[in-house]
Image (tube, helix red, strand yellow):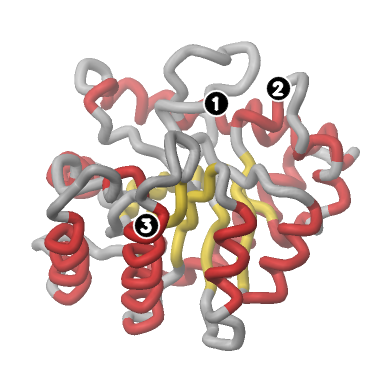
């Protein structure tokens, strides 16, 4: 299995990061992709990638909420561009992420977030890298913005997909996207669970978003990559297939998006 979205470089893992990695390996997780957040956490992500070069693959990007109330966000975007142009020693980025729109907390920085998103999508196209999209309370805005990239060859992962079936169908027309399914699919009131089986298995990838969004029965506790098994099992249940098929199909889908950048 591949955890396509995990932040185990977060300080919440400082006391037991090696143990967390060991548990993930024991659970059958073969790769962990690390989306970036901001300049304050890049070095921790780099350190983890160097410690586990066969397991962890880093990305580069500026999270949309790291744009909010940040008078230096354009400088931070330049740093993203600089890293992509000249990666640090021992680092090979597999994508641009996580980037996107997050209007959950407030809508005051929508213009700045859209600028940052377009800036980073353009970098992804320039370097032929997939993107990892974060969308929260901004599905209509995201679809409107991405419309202008139709036909550009844009590809990536729609992280923690929480849109509607119509959003899924629209985004599939815009570019080559797979949709990250994580812990919320195990929640009793998960809207996506109601229509997941209407989405093609060829469009799904697995993710945990560790340390966030733990699946049942660990909801509310720190998440980690080993719990990808619970997510995989729930998806298999919703599709009426064996978990092994979900493992195989989602792994294949992940390689279709990232290619040899995660070898």
Mark 2 and mark 3 lie on one chain; the one further toward the N terminus is: 3
Q: Residue at x 54, y 41 (%)?
A: 207
Mark 2 and mark 1 lie on one chain; the one further toward the N terminus is: 2
Give the number of marks: 3
Q: Nearer the viewer, mark 2 or mark 1?
A: 2
Q: Looking at the figure, which quarter contains the N terminus?
A: top right
| Quadrant of the image occupied by residue 148 | bottom right
For label 1, the residue is 227
Indicate the position of residue 35 as horizontal and vertical percent values.
36, 49
* Left/right of residue 8 with respect to residue 219 in the rendered view: left
User: Eyeballing the image, is 45 above or below 171?
Assistant: above
> Mark 1 touching mark 3, by CB under 8 A?
no
- Tag of residue 160: none
Indicate the position of residue 224 as horizontal and vertical percent values.
44, 26
Q: Residue at x 64, y 17 (%)?
A: 216
For label 3, the residue is 113
User: Dot 2 lies on which element?
Assistant: loop
Mark 1 and mark 3 lie on one chain; the one further toward the N terminus is: 3
User: Tag 1: Cα neighbours inside 10 Å, few (<14), some, or many (≥20)?
Assistant: many
Q: Residue at x 81, y 44 (%)?
A: 196
- Tag of residue 187: 2
Tell me if I can see residue 95 in this picture.
Answer: no
Tell me if I can see residue 123 in this picture.
Answer: yes
Q: CA distance from mark 2 to mark 1?
A: 14 Å
User: Tag 2: Cα neighbours inside 10 Å, few (<14), some, or many (≥20)?
Assistant: some
Indicate the position of residue 87 as horizontal and vertical percent values.
15, 67
Q: Nearer the viewer, mark 1 or mark 3?
A: 3
Q: CA distance from mark 2 to mark 3?
A: 29 Å
Q: Residue at x 62, y 64 (%)?
A: 143
User: Eyeballing the image, is 74 above or below 70?
Assistant: below
* Left/right of residue 194 with respect to residue 106 in the rendered view: right
């Amino acid at each position: 299995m591949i955890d396509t979205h995990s932040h185990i470089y977060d300080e919440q893992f400082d006391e037991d990061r090696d143990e967390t990695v060991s548990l993930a390996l024991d659970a059958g997780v073969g790769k962990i992709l690390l989306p970036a957040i901001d300049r304050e956490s890049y070095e921790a992500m780099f350190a983890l990638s160097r410690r586990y070069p066969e397991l962890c693959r880093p990305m580069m990007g500026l999270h949309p909420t790291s744009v909010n109330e940040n008078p230096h966000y354009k400088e931070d975007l330049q740093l993203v561009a600089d890293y992509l142009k000249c990666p640090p020693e021992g680092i090979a980025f597999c994508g641009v992420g996580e980037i996107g729109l997050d209007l959950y907390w407030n809508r005051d920085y929508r213009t700045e977030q859209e600028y940052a998103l377009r800036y980073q999508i353009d970098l992804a196209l320039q370097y032929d890298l997939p993107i990892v999209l974060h969308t929260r309370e901004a599905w209509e805005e995201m679809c409107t913005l991405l419309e202008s990239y139709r036909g550009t060859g844009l590809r990536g992962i729609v992280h923690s997909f929480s849109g509607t079936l119509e959003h899924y169908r629209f985004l599939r027309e815009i570019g080559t996207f797979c949709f990250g399914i994580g812990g919320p699919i195990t929640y009793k009131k998960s809207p996506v669970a109601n229509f997941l089986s209407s989405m093609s298995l060829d469009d799904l990838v697995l993710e945990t978003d560790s340390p966030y969004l733990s699946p049942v029965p660990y909801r509310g506790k720190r998440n980690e990559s080993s719990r990808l098994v619970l997510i995989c099992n729930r998806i298999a249940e919703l599709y009426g297939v064996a978990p092994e098929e979900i493992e195989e199909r989602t792994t294949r889908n992940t390689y279709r998006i990232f290619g040899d950048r995660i070898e």
